[in-house]
Amino acid sequence: MILPTTTAFYAAILGLIYVGLSGWVMGGRLTGNVLFGDGGQDALQRRIRSHANFIEYVPFALGLIALYEAGGGSQGWVRSLLIILVIARILHPIGMLAGPNTPRQFACRGGGILATLAVMAGAAVLLLLQTR
């Protein structure tokens, strides 16, 4: 088994995005004077959900991709999946702050989560094919 260095590089980028999302939530809490929960503030709730959605999906996606890479998977597939994942995770919070039923909400929020799920499914299928 090899060290999944490509995945590690993109995991670091995603880690920085996560730090940014954490700061975004903290900033919303400070400006809204909210210590716990969302204080009934819609914008803060959206920030919190963007942050939570990231941590719900990204570690699992990275794990699948890292296993595929460590098993000698194609670097083209690894890099493609990771680039799509980074773009998707940047788009999602942008869409979370968009107005309801707007093109930006559908494209960014919807596109971000659909792309994330596609990355997970693609990595899972590649991993299954690799381990047969």
Image: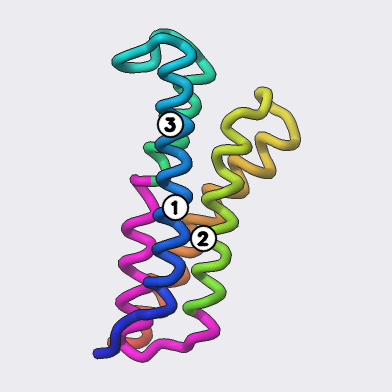
Q: Which residues are magenta?
A: 55-77
Q: Is residue 61 magenta?
A: yes
Q: Is residue 52 left or right of residue 31?
A: left
Mark 1: which secondary structure? helix
Q: Amino acid at mark 2?
A: Leu
- For label 3, the crowd category at 10 Å Cα-Cα, with few meaning under 14, some 14 to 19 and many 20 or more, is some
Residue that appears at 41% across and 18% down: 29
Query: Where residue 82 sits in the image (x, y, percent)?
Result: 50, 68
Instruction: Find disc 1 in the rendering and name its residue.
Output: 16
Work out how far the residue at label 1 is from the one at label 3, CA to CA, in angstroms.
Answer: 18 Å
For marks 1 and 3, the one nearer the N-term is: 1
Residue that appears at 60% across and 43% down: 110
Instruction: Find disc 2 in the rendering and name its residue.
Output: 85
Q: Nearer the viewer, mark 1 or mark 3?
A: 1
Outermost residue, left side = 1
Residue that appears at 62% across and 38% down: 94
Majority SS type along the magenta span: helix
Q: Nearer the viewer, mark 1 or mark 2?
A: 1
Residue 42, above or below 99: above
Residue 25, above or below 63: above
Work out how far the residue at label 1 is from the one at label 2, CA to CA, in angstroms.
Answer: 14 Å
- For label 1, the crowd category at 10 Å Cα-Cα, with few meaning under 14, some 14 to 19 and many 20 or more, is few
**Most foreground residue, 19 or 115:** 19
**Is residue 22 at least partly visible in the picture?**
yes
For marks 2 and 3, the one nearer the N-term is: 3
Instruction: Find disc 3 in the rendering and name its residue.
Output: 49
Q: Quadrant of residue 97?
A: top right
Q: Amino acid at mark 1?
A: Leu
Mark 3: which secondary structure? helix
